[in-house]
Image (cartoon, rainbow, N blue to C red):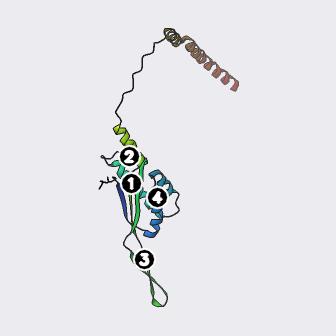
């Protein structure tokens, strides 16, 4: 018999979610086998209330995969391998009915589990990168520098700025301001 290599997976689980397993399975069936970005999109646009809880579990599984030091996985290269909802304990409550009778109310819970693995394309790309010999890029030859272009650039940059013209305009403005105040005082009186 040939040995089958196990796929390494990362999983997250939410227990005692206040929803029935039957309703949760409708949503988990939609994301099973999909990539993580595609599954997030499906869950974001789902009208079912349990989709928010499943999205939390998916985010937790991605965080588990990214935080493991032995796996250098990116969240965008992961695939939802398994997604299922098992039944949890049922809380039994009673409601009063007519003639002193009662009806049973079942508050169901479920356990949601999601397992992620790397996509086959990402695994193949990582294997090719590891198998390929590392090659250095050839060095580039130095290009000769044109001296005329450099001389023109330095000539343009070294043009002096006249500072005396700025100082003279400031002094003329100072001289005009006292005269204007004198004329306004004379017109008022």
Residue at screen point 63% across, 22% down: 181
Q: Which mark is residue 130?
A: none
Q: First in sequence, mark 2 or 1: give its number.
A: 1
Q: First in sequence, mark 4 or 2: give its number.
A: 4
The residue singled out by tag 3 in the image is: 106
Q: Secondary structure at mark 2?
A: helix
Q: Nearer the viewer, mark 4 or mark 3?
A: 4
Q: In the rendered view, would you say 136 is above or below 106? A: above
Q: Secondary structure at mark 1?
A: strand
Question: Would residue 56 be seen by someone viewing this image from the given angle?
Answer: yes
Residue 97 placed where, x, y %? 48, 86
Q: Nearer the viewer, mark 2 or mark 1?
A: 2
Could you tell me how far apart the alpha carbons at marks 4 and 3 are, in whole angstroms? 28 Å
Q: In the rendered view, would you say 104 is above or below 171? A: below
Q: In the rendered view, would you say 87 is above or below 75? A: below
Q: Counting other residues with Cα less than 10 Å from the Cα at mark 3, is it few (<14), some (14-19), or many (20 or more)?
A: few
Q: Secondary structure at mark 4?
A: helix
Q: Counting other residues with Cα less than 10 Å from the Cα at mark 1, is it few (<14), some (14-19), or many (20 or more)?
A: many
Q: First in sequence, mark 4 or 3: give its number.
A: 4
The residue singled out by tag 2 in the image is: 123
The residue singled out by tag 1 in the image is: 116
Q: Which mark is residue 31?
A: 4
């Amino acid at each position: 018999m040939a040995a089958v290599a196990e796929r390494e997976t990362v999983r997250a689980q939410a227990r005692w979610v206040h929803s029935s397993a039957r309703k949760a399975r409708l949503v988990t069936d939609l994301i099973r086998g999909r990539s993580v970005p595609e599954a997030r999109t499906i869950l974001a646009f789902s009208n079912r209330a349990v989709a928010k809880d499943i999205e939390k579990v998916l985010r937790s599984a991605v965080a588990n995969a990214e935080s493991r030091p032995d796996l250098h996985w990116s969240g965008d290269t992961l695939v939802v391998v398994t997604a299922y909802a098992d039944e949890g304990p049922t809380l039994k409550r009673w409601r009063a009915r007519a003639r002193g009778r009662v009806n049973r109310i079942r508050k169901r819970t479920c356990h949601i589990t999601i397992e992620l693995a790397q996509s086959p394309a990402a695994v193949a790309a990582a294997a090719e990168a590891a198998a390929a010999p590392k090659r250095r890029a050839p060095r580039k030859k130095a290009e000769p520098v044109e001296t005329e272009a450099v001389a023109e650039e330095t000539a343009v940059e070294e043009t002096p700025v006249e500072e005396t013209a700025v100082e003279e305009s400031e002094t003329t403005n100072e001289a005009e301001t006292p005269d204007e105040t004198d004329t306004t005082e004379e017109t008022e009186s």
